[in-house]
Amino acid sequence: MTSGIEYRSLSTAYKNDSSPMIHDDNMNEFDISEIQDFQNRSLVEIIFRQLEGMILSGKIQPGERINESKLSNLLGVSRAPIREALRLLASSGILEVRANRGMFVRDLQIDEVEGLYDIRAALDVLAGERAAERINHEHLQILNRWIKEMTACVEANDTDAYYRANIAFHAAIVEITGNANLLSIYEGVCKQMSLFRKISLSIPGHLRLSLQRHKKIVDAIKSKKSAKAASVMKNHTLGAKKALLRSIKTKKTSL
């Protein structure tokens, strides 16, 4: 009823207008499936983003099964957008499919952890070189803002907030390079690393040590010396790798 009233009022309003009216028969040509597809894609993005956040924040742990049916009932949506969101998470390396068992949060093995850190170190070398070449006053302000944010997190002993600021700091360096492909690859690697990187930050005293290393990165990039920036970035990442592996091995021997 409401749409009919609106339609008549529009007809009255434009009665004296010379523009041609849209007739009901022409509305049959409208492709409703495209709107429905858009709605589904929007829903997939929301489910993807929220699940990704829960996994990367540690609310859903490595090795934990993602129950598709339970999610469908909880969210009150069909299983199709949930299935698509899970497929996207699997393609990003955060989830893994286990035959006849379903989707699980990826539980990385030590050799996979080492491999990801080595890739990250290589990307950091390139990011450090290019950032040192392109750094300007505005870029430096952005990096220093994140250093200030991380400093506040250290003082508050807030590991979760420090971790988020740390990720943003490194993303800002890659953005300075102006290389969109590098940023895309870097973010993909970092998302997989997020499944275990918070372990090293939880080591007593490591937050303060990490902050000092990040300050050295800013100084190296600020110097505009590409080789120096690349070396500091690489040593930072490989140092984090050693700290994490020590932590993992210590936990395993204590079990």
Image (spheres, rainbow, N blue to C red):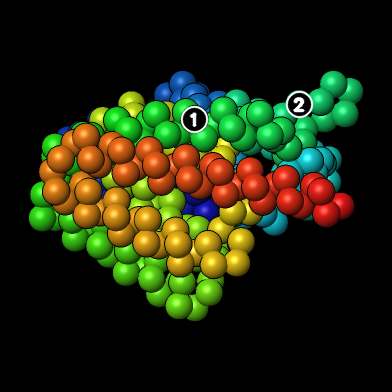
- What amino acid does circle 1 point to? Asp
Rendering coords of residue 234 (x, y %): 38, 38
Observer-side mark, 2 or 1, equals 1
Residue under label 2: 97
Q: Is residue 205 left or right of residue 216?
A: right
How many other residues sit within 10 Å of disc 2, few (<14), some (14-19) or many (≥20)? some
Q: Nearer the viewer, residue 125 or 82?
A: 125
Q: Nearer the viewer, residue 44 or 250?
A: 250
Q: Is residue 124 left or right of residue 54?
A: left
Mark 2 or 1 closer to N-term? 2
Q: Residue shown at 34%/42% (left/top)?
A: 233
Rendering coords of residue 75 (x, y %): 73, 51
Rendering coords of residue 11 (x, y %): 33, 45
Q: CA distance from mark 2 to mark 1?
A: 25 Å
Q: Most extreme residue toward the left, as rendered?
A: 137
Q: Residue shown at 80%/47% (left/top)?
A: 252
Q: Is residue 17 visible?
A: no
Q: Nearer the viewer, residue 35 or 249?
A: 249
Q: Residue shown at 23%/40% (left/top)?
A: 228
Residue under label 1: 118
Rendering coords of residue 113 (x, y %): 61, 35
Q: Secondary structure at mark 1?
A: helix
Q: Secondary structure at mark 2?
A: strand
Q: Nearer the viewer, residue 185 or 197?
A: 197
Q: Residue shown at 71%/33% (left/top)?
A: 109
Q: Is residue 139 left or right of residue 123?
A: left
Q: Is residue 146 above or below residue 47?
A: below
Q: Is residue 196 above or below residue 99?
A: below
- What amino acid does circle 2 point to? Val
Q: Is residue 245 visible?
A: yes
